[in-house]
Image (spheres, rainbow, N blue to C red):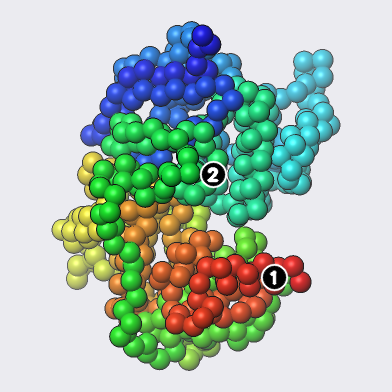
Amino acid sequence: MQKPLLFLKSIHKEFPGVKALRGVDFTLEKGQIVSLVGTNGAGKSTLSSIIAGICTPDQGEVFIEGNKVTISDPNVAEELGIGIVHQEPTLVPNMTVVENIFLNKEITRKGIVLDKEKMKQESLKVLEFLGFQIDVDKKVEDLSLVEKEVVEIAKAMFLKPKILILDEVTAPLNKSEVDHLFKIMKDLKANGMGIIFIGHKLQEIIEISDSIVVFRDGKNVGELMPTGELSEKEIIALMLGVTLNEDLGTGEQDPEFEQGQEVLNLVNLTKHGIYKDISFKLNKGELVGFAGLKGSGITELLLSIQGIDTFDEGEMYVKSKRVKFKNPKDGIDSGIGMITNDRQKEGLALTLDVKENIAVSSLEYICNKLKLIDTKTLKENAQKYVKALSIKTPTIHQFVQNLSGGNQQKIVIAKWLLRDLDIILVDEPTRGVDVKAKNEIYKLLINEKNNGKSLLVASPEIRELLSICDKILIVINGSIVSEVRRNTREFNEEDILNIIHSADHH
Ligand SMILES: Nc1ncnc2c1ncn2[C@@H]1O[C@H](COP(=O)(O)OP(=O)(O)OP(=O)(O)O)[C@@H](O)[C@H]1O
């Protein structure tokens, strides 16, 4: 009988204060796509890091095609035919696309001169295979999140791996980009590659996997085949260790809630080539959503409203006072904060610990009269949010870089909610966050609204917006094409998707 492409036996891995993996077995066959699912911090990325040689197990054995191997570092993994695309981009920002793809594998002529033309042609070939057009001479720091992701995939593909690990790669992609990626994955699988797919979007997982392995607290608690009967609910129940009908509680609107006066007014806000003539008002206690395709300018609009970026034309009023912010501090001084979708770049100080990160943007609230940090308040606040959002960390003194991706996202949210600003802008609040934490985040956002805060939330997940928003503004190619209010006929997923797609085709 043919030996499995990859077999892991009884893998244990402990970090200080955390048992990340507790006796995990895992099998991947040739030409198979196996998904790993589990709540934030369940151990998915730790397992993939072990397979990719990024960290070594404390106990357990790894076999490739029946041969016992020791994957002591990433180079050994590469030699064994293992490629990985990480949850967070690992590219070098100030190097070009080609330089990144060929980093440490540069093609030379006569062993000394770099063959730049050849490397360029080879990079273009892989990108073409992936179906994306990216200027390979561009610096990675000038690429969009989606483009960075594609370059990561291209880099992994370059080594023609036998085993490919995709760790939450679909998070920044829109539906058609995900469809495209799935098509590529199916082609690779048909050529015999084994693929490990890690993600939180269960519909995607069910669509692409041959088999679904569920992790809970560092152990595999079940393996499911995505058959017709397999519902999201079954996976969720296994992930959380609850019975099927247990209510997770969703973010529900308070129908009695009365909105207050206008806090933000945009008049024909324009950033050339990105968004145009954006006009709308936001009231106290109102939660407004933005729906649209990726690249429609929503993220850039939010960045301009906060002051992280500027706008070219139009007027913006905060509580009837005309403003034009030059930087994020101006925005914060006017009471506007933003939870961005790029947590590594804009959201977190990875080398500080959990409590410091939660406190970092609200120091005046945790300083005493002498302007010294009140460590008791600092700790209490950190503990409150760690509990409210079920942030998986051994203590509040853990460095944030040691937390799993989803738990880092929860910290970004905690940090801004603690800040107590009047207007909160949120870009993709639940990216990389597990189902249970999603509900907790919805509840927190609605709670903010019920406390009189005003929120603008952008999300590619229409269902998410429908469950929390008073109204949804639909943005296509930089313009608002429609406004859909709660309690109207169009306030449902199908109608909103129809509006988006019909407007996009005009
Ligand atoms: N280098 C490290 N030092 C300390 N703890 C770590 C380290 N790496 C991971 N951990 C911890 O190990 C546990 C498992 O983390 P892992 O990243 O594998 O989770 P995950 O299932 O991938 O989560 P997510 O869905 O949020 O990405 C977490 O509690 C995490 O904080």
Distance between the Cα atoms at labels 1 and 2?
Answer: 25 Å
Helix, strand or loop at mark 2? helix
Which label was assigned to residue 207? 2
Query: What residue is shown at x 51% (from left), y 81% (from top)?
Result: 489
Which label was assigned to residue 127? none
Q: Position of residue 504 (x, y in %)?
A: 71, 68
Residue 268's place in the image compared with 59, above or below, is below
Tell me which amino acid carries mark 2.
Glu
Tell me which amino acid carries mark 1.
Ser
Query: What residue is shown at x 32% (from left), y 19% (from top)?
Result: 10
Viewer-closest of 126 and 313: 126
For label 1, the residue is 502
Residue 180's place in the image compared with 421, above or below, is above
Q: Position of residue 253 (x, y in %)?
A: 34, 75
Determine whether, in the image, residue 347 is placed left or right of residue 245.
Answer: right
Q: Position of residue 493 (x, y in %)?
A: 52, 68
Residue density around tag 1, few if under 14, some if 14–19, many if 20 or more, within 10 Å: few
In the image, farthest residue toward the front? 229
Q: Position of residue 319 (x, y in %)?
A: 44, 88
**Sequence-first disc among 1 and 2:** 2
Helix, strand or loop at mark 1? helix
Query: What residue is shown at x 41% (from left), y 48% (from top)?
Result: 231
Determine whether, in the image, residue 247 is placed left or right of residue 429.
Answer: left
Residue 192's place in the image compared with 320, above or below, is above
